[in-house]
Amino acid sequence: MGRLRKLLIPGVDKKLLVKDATKLMPDLMRRRFITGGASFGALALLTGCDVVDSSSAEEVLKKVSKFNDAVQAFIFNPDALAPTFPESAITKPFPFNAYYEIDDAPEVNGDEWKLEVRGLVDNKKSWTLEELYKLPQVKQVTRHICVEGWSAIGSWTGTPLSHFLKLIGADTRAKYCWFQCADKEGYNSPLDMRSALHPQTQMTFKFADKILPRAYGFPMKIRVPTKLGFKNPKYVLSMEVTNDYKGGYWEDQGYNSFSGS
């Protein structure tokens, strides 16, 4: 009886908490949890948390999310490719996606912009757009999948991030590439190193064979077709190779950091 009293949550809807938690679970775990009778008590036992208020409810979700990240990272196959498509399948118009309106998208002066490189790399020089444009580039037609449930197919051209990391002498044993962007409110995002080295992960400079438009991240975005859309940072200002988990704009709000296949 005392245990049940501890599980009462003032101001927190228990059904919604369980629903949110199951969304964060890997598919196999979610199926077993639901089959076994998804309940508030089961969730508390699963995470080892006593949920007595809103802040402890948030802690439960964070624990489930962290577990989900670990499972996804464990099963990630660095050799498995995201599907590619013919150019006839490209979504037109390709939607603008951000947490702000298109009129508020950053306006970056490409003539003055330089990509700052920091952290565990041999060469920390900053790169101009002109220098980056001279690097080997490849085109891919892949699907952008938004966490909100919609998707769109686009054509992206740029340099494989793995090539650039090799070029600057990055320590690819490090855990993360961390990107800082020009978006309002200081957008940033971590990318696990295995995903950074994936052959389709790209420093993107063109969309539909033209210089990357402002709407899609000029002067450079990181295109990661094996991840959800919010893991594809735009308007990139700097990249840091690091073993430190520095969080991210959406990750700090509870979104899974791995968020990929």
Image (cartoon, rainbow, N blue to C red):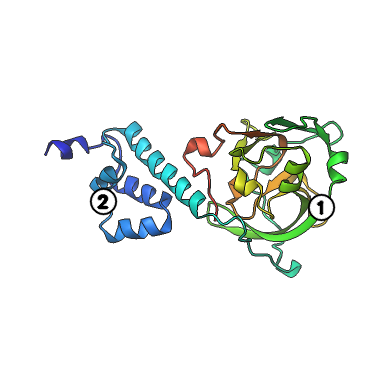
Which residue is disc 2 drawn over?
A: 39
Kindly indicate the quadrant of the structure image that contains residue 110. top right
Disc 1 to disc 2, how far (Cα)? 50 Å
Percent across and percent down for residue 48 are 28, 39
Residue 19 marker: none
- Residue type beneath disc 1: Gln
Describe the element under mark 2 as helix, strand or loop: loop
Q: Is residue 20 above or below residue 140?
A: above
Taking 163 as reference, is 65 left or right? left
Task: Tell me whether circle 1 and circle 2 mark residues in contact (CB < 8 Å).
Answer: no
Q: Residue at x 76, y 30 (%)?
A: 124
Q: Is residue 119 above or below residue 233?
A: above
Kindly indicate the quadrant of the structure image that contains residue 91. bottom right
Taking 230 as reference, is 16 left or right? left
Percent across and percent down for residue 223 are 68, 50
Residue 218 visible in the shown view: no
Taking 192 as reference, is 154 left or right? right
Q: 141 or 66, which is in the foreground?
A: 66
Which residue is disc 1 drawn over?
A: 137
Describe the element under mark 1 as helix, strand or loop: loop
Q: Residue furthest left?
A: 1
- Residue type beneath disc 2: Ser
